Amino acid sequence: MGAILATTVALYDIGGPLRLPLMLLAGALGGALWIALPAILKLRFGVSEVIVTLLSSNIAFLFLQHLLFGPFGDTTHNFPTSPVFDGLEKLPQLSFGDTHLGLIIALVALALIGLATHRMRFGFAARFAVDNPRAAEALGFNTTRVMLTSILIGGAMAGLAGAVIVTGTEHRLTQAVGLNMTFNGIIIAALARNLPLLIPIVAFFIAGLSVASQSLKVFYGVSEGIVLIIQGSILLTLVTFQFATTYRVTFQSRRLA
Amino acid sequence: MLDWIALERRAGVSAWRSAATYIAALVVAIALSLGVVVAAGVPTGALFEELIVQVFLAPAGLARTLTAATPMMLAALAATLCLRLKLKGSC
């Protein structure tokens, strides 16, 4: 949804010289708004976030297809993509290959959120609200507000990721925007043990796998799915080892049982 | 049926044990991954070149990896914020 709103700003020429920051802002806003419904349903009515987010992801994808085959479609060819953005609507390149300003934006976001979650009252309140909501309420923390804020920031980051893809890499909206991004995000978060400061290292490693898969596909005919298998094995191994560290398996004799 | 197997939560896990587990898991995972890649038909001799040099060491490959990592970092940040709240789903 972030990519869609960022593209909307570009295609309707909104914002004049401030269009690029506005696109990124719109992307973040789109992500936050899209997650707001599942968040409110969860926090107010206890509706399962798994079901709601799965369905809302499907809706977002179908909406994206509708836009690409309709109002956002590039009429100069038959592929379902939007027109290519103007120079003003692309993130500036850094002087190292294809890297762009999005990298700096991502690192700054990671640093700020890392600081907020580990060194500020907000992070403490969020942890407290999860671990012991009753005690947190008794001590005056508004747990619902803390959790909602945290979820909305998460949504904003997801939206910003979409906006960074369209403004920095693709330079237009495509059907593949955000493909596998949810899965990658969850794997990276799990491998980084939910520590924002570890995310860049793990993301670099997972991105390396993704880049390697393209080369392996071209030179050795290896399927791109092999990367998903590798990611799955890494996650499974890590979870198994964590389980073994957290729990001890004991075997009782049948007589005792 | 399986009442002769019981799970006991360990009282506490020391930091070094936790770190060692993490490193061991990564080593096993990397070994498994290399096995998968070799089974998929990539010659063993080309693994280092394709998975390390071309992705992390060669300037063009490093730039491609950093570009690919950029949105992943933000997506992971989104997932982290939700997972810290013990929420599931594609948050």
Image (spheres, rainbow, N blue to C red):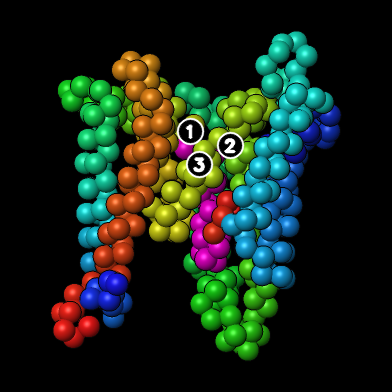
Q: Please state, as top left, top right, bottom left or bottom right, where the N terminus of chain A lies in the image.
A: top right
Amino acid at the residue labelled 3: Met
The residue nearer to you, when weighing A190 against A94, is A190
Type of secondary structure dominating the magenta stretch: helix
What numbered label is drawn on residue B68? 1
Q: Which image quadrant is residue B43 in? A: top left
Q: Nearer the viewer, mark 3 or mark 2?
A: 2
What segment carries the magenta color? B68-87
Cβ–Cβ below 8 Å for labels 3 and 1? yes
Residue under label 2, please give it: A178
Q: Residue at x 54, y 81 (%)?
A: A132
Residue under label 3, please give it: B72
Amino acid at the residue labelled 2: Gly
The residue nearer to you, when weighing A64 against A92, is A64
Left or right: A112, with A148 as reference point? left
Q: In the displayed orientation, state which residue is furthest to the top.
A: A76
Q: Chain of mark 3?
A: B
x%, y% of residue A208?
A: 38, 34
Local crowd size for mark 2, using a 10 Å CA cut-off: few (<14), some (14–19), many (≥20): many
Local crowd size for mark 3, using a 10 Å CA cut-off: few (<14), some (14–19), many (≥20): many
**Do marks 3 and 1 share a chain?**
yes
Position of A21 relative to A76 (above/below): below
Q: Secondary structure at mark 3?
A: helix
